[in-house]
Amino acid sequence: MSGSHERGFASDNYAGIHPEILAAMAKVNHGHQPAYGADEVTAELETRMREHFGENAQVFPVFNGTGANVVSLQSLTRRWEAVICAQTAHINVDEGGAPEKVAGLKLWTVPTSDGKLTPELIATQVFDTGFVHRAQQAVVTVTQSTEMGTVYSPAEIKAIADYCHGQGLTLHLDGARISNAAASLGVPFRAFTTDAGVDIVSFGGTKIGAMLSEAVVVLNPEYASAVPFIRKTYMQLASKMRFISAQLLALLDNDLWLRNATHANAMATRLAAGVSSIPGVSITQPVQANAVFAVLPIAVTERLQEDFHFYVWNHQTGEVRWMCAWDTTEADIDTFVAAISNEMAAG
């Protein structure tokens, strides 16, 4: 095998910027606007976000998802406090230690086969409250959709929020792929955030078609006052913020977020259906958003990776992750499925 295909399946971050988002950035690229979020575009974004998350929502655009998570979690914690997360959580395995190194947080991790936490799993780390020798649990974070491609129902998140608040904990939602989750569930964002009791959200735009645009969305006003200062201290305050806000506005306008997410999810479903009939390929997780996890022989993976970009998720088991994006086409899927079939047949 040789050559390189235009699109791969390593990450939805590999996709380009949606044309409607580029157009929105160009549209605001005229004249002067006040800096650091005092512009009219950011004001409009705040209004639109409240339509999706409720009248108490406060929005703080940032550059990237790691920044959104660090700012969110730091705003909910004091120096001696800790965050409970799934062992597979992005903050634990894919942020270069930023929550620990930048925010100074201790992460209490919980093994979970599908990437999802439950009140029972969280409870395994809720102990020794007031014990000076243990970092004190303060926040629980869930990812929606999860790092394993699974999706929490609104009821599941509400159960977690009720447990957290009953224990004096706050709840953060890492929504790097929040659009894919909402599209999968067929519900508005607020159904599994505001209405379910989430305190603060990292709202993702980059993976669904933006260039660099995420936001901290504070749903519980009690935790909003610290965010502007933490955002500045952690180098996430954009001077020309109108260009970040314009990207998020474009996603919300005409339901671009929903169109992009629905398409990406559908491509993952098509991929899963295509490979499920190939002997020797095992899908390991429910395909509920835009990710497909599967196990296939390591030699086959290595040959496929000569032409297709994708990640090996578990080097011990041979599990791989295939991500679909807003611009993945049916032809991309069919070409990839045919390649997998041919390589599996070759042994």
Image (spheres, rainbow, N blue to C red):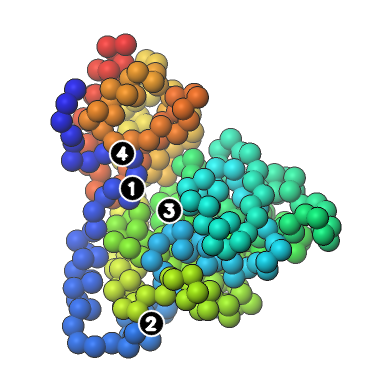
Residue marked by disc 1: 12
Q: Distance between the residues labelled 2 and 3?
A: 26 Å
Please tell me which of labels 2 and 4 falls first in the chain. 4
Query: What is the number of the mark on residue 9?
Result: 4
Q: Which residue corresponds to the image point at 46% horizontal and 58% vertical from the top-left?
A: 66
Query: What is the number of the mark on residue 36?
Result: 2
As drawn, 36 above or below 203: below
Q: Which of marks 1 and 2 is in front?
A: 2
Q: Nearer the viewer, mark 2 or mark 3?
A: 2
Identify the amino acid type marked 2.
Tyr
Q: Residue furthest front?
A: 101
Q: Distance between the residues labelled 4 and 3?
A: 16 Å
Identify the amino acid type marked 3.
Arg
Q: Which residue corresponds to the image point at 66% horizontal and 60% vertical from the top-left?
A: 139
Q: Based on the displayed image, in which of its 4 quarters is residue 26 positioned?
A: bottom left
Q: What element carries label 2?
A: loop
Near-viewer residue (239 or 256): 239
Please tell me which of labels 3 and 1 falls first in the chain. 1
Identify the amino acid type marked 1.
Asp
Disc 2 crowd, CA 10 A, few/some/many (<14, 14-19, 20+): some
Image spot of residue 87 (x, y percent): 59, 43
Disc 4 crowd, CA 10 A, few/some/many (<14, 14-19, 20+): many
Near-viewer residue (130 or 187): 130
Q: Is mark 1 on a helix, strand or loop?
A: helix
Q: How far apart are marks 3 and 1 (CA)?
A: 10 Å
Left or right of 79: which side holds 180? left
Residue marked by disc 3: 177
Q: Which residue corresponds to the image point at 42% horizontal and 75% vertical from the top-left?
A: 237
Q: Which of marks 4 and 3 is in front?
A: 4
Q: Is residue 11 visible?
A: yes
